[in-house]
Amino acid sequence: MENRKSTLYLVVSISVVATLLVVILGAFAGGLILAPHLLEPAQAANSSQAATNTDLVAAYEQSLIDLYRTALPSVVNINVTKEFDHPSVENFESSPFPFPGMPDDPENFFSRGQGSGFVWDDEGHIVTNHHVVVNATDISVTFANGETVPAEVLGSDPNADLAVIRVDLPASELQPVPLGDSSTLQVGQLAIAIGNPFGQEFTMTSGIISAVGRTIRSGNTLFSIPEVIQTDAPINPGNSGGPLLNRQGEVVGINTQIISSSGANSGIGFAVPINTAKQVVPTLIKGDQYEYAWLGITGRTLTSDIAEQMSLSEDTKGALVLAVSQDGPADEAGLQGSEETTSTSGDNKQEIGGDIIAAINGQSINAMDDLITYLIAETRPGDTVTLDVIHADGQQEQIDVILGTRPTSFSAESEETPEQDK
């Protein structure tokens, strides 16, 4: 009896194991059969994503190609010849006449330079930088189709580093480039430069808008240019005067300077905002000098440590007046410059004790850049402005100032000009 039970249990166990094996093997086989079908949606999704990425890259490339082709007829390369009295030390060894008094030693010497520009209108006006064409004795302009024509300077503004030259060509051969609005720019937007870097004609580089609202020296005068655009789009010598474009192909700036220890691009370039050009260029086209309102001070942003040194609240904001130009508008209105110096961190000497401009015509001034921007954008020579002033003793006063016309040269009581009003 026991043997029969054992045999029965063994048969049942073998049957269960066999059934389980069949189920497992069936599931495995079914998995093998169904696996490709289960993987198909994931593979299809990956394929679709790869195709989408490729399409996006292709679309981006095509947009740059289209932008270049559209803007190219509007961009020009500028070649200039400038006269100088004698070879500089740098040019001495390369000069064909290195020793004065030698036979055939010319009285005058010439240097050649290059820059870029763009067509402003269909009347032959081309915009570039002041420093590209200043003191030029001969200027020629080359278009993308290879045509080279002479040009003449109509007007130039060293303060904004802008100039207008003119070529004699029919309107049908000129393609003005559309102008954008530099006040709407945002950090991160695409930026495209086209120009003549290192003499390499009609080169396009791209990057982004790295910063907006910078203030830089014009490079030609002691005055500053506000609202300047910073970009990492590669800009090199020869790009000066060329357009900085947005992705719609509109000019948003005029390339003007770079920060570099080697003279080549290091990722920080600057462009004069197109809105400044819109102000200045029409006057230059007429052959007139653009006149800026002038307050007549040298100043810098008031910092918290200087405010503390002057026994003011650390959160006091404004433009600290370092010096006033003798008999200038600020001087005549009674503004006072700094009369003391103090040591700050690192034993740096800083001026203190001058008036602080906290507002102009009711608009708060948090930094010197704010004052520069307001004077250029909102005022003209002869305007009367009301300044909210904090004196060195902490007393506050409103002072009316009749703005003058910016002089061609600036002489203030101080040699140091960290920031200059406009």
Image: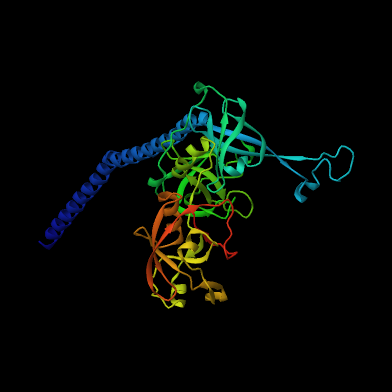
Q: Residue 187: tell me if it is visible.
A: no
Q: Residue 162: tell me if it is visible.
A: yes
Instruction: Return the x and y of residue 185 as percentages of the image width and height.
Output: 40, 46
Instruction: Return the x and y of residue 8 as percentages of the image width and height.
Output: 13, 56
Residue 241 as seen in the image, left or right of residue 82: left
Residue 184 as seen in the image, left or right of residue 107: left
Q: How many marks?
A: 0
Residue at (53% x, 76% y) in the render: 342
- Please determine whether, in this image, residue 71 is positioned above or below residue 273: above
Instruction: Return the x and y of residue 261 as percentages of the image width and height.
Output: 62, 55
- Please determine whether, in this image, residue 386 is positioned above or below residue 99: below
Viewer-closest of 86 and 340: 340
- Please determine whether, in this image, residue 210 is positioned above or below residue 140: below
Residue 275 as seen in the image, left or right of residue 11: right
Viewer-closest of 389 and 346: 389
Quadrant where the N terminus lies?
A: bottom left
Residue at (41% x, 54% y) in the render: 374
Instruction: Return the x and y of residue 75 as percentages of the image width and height.
Output: 53, 33
* Colouring scheme applied when the structure was drawn: rainbow
Residue 132 as seen in the image, left or right of residue 244: right
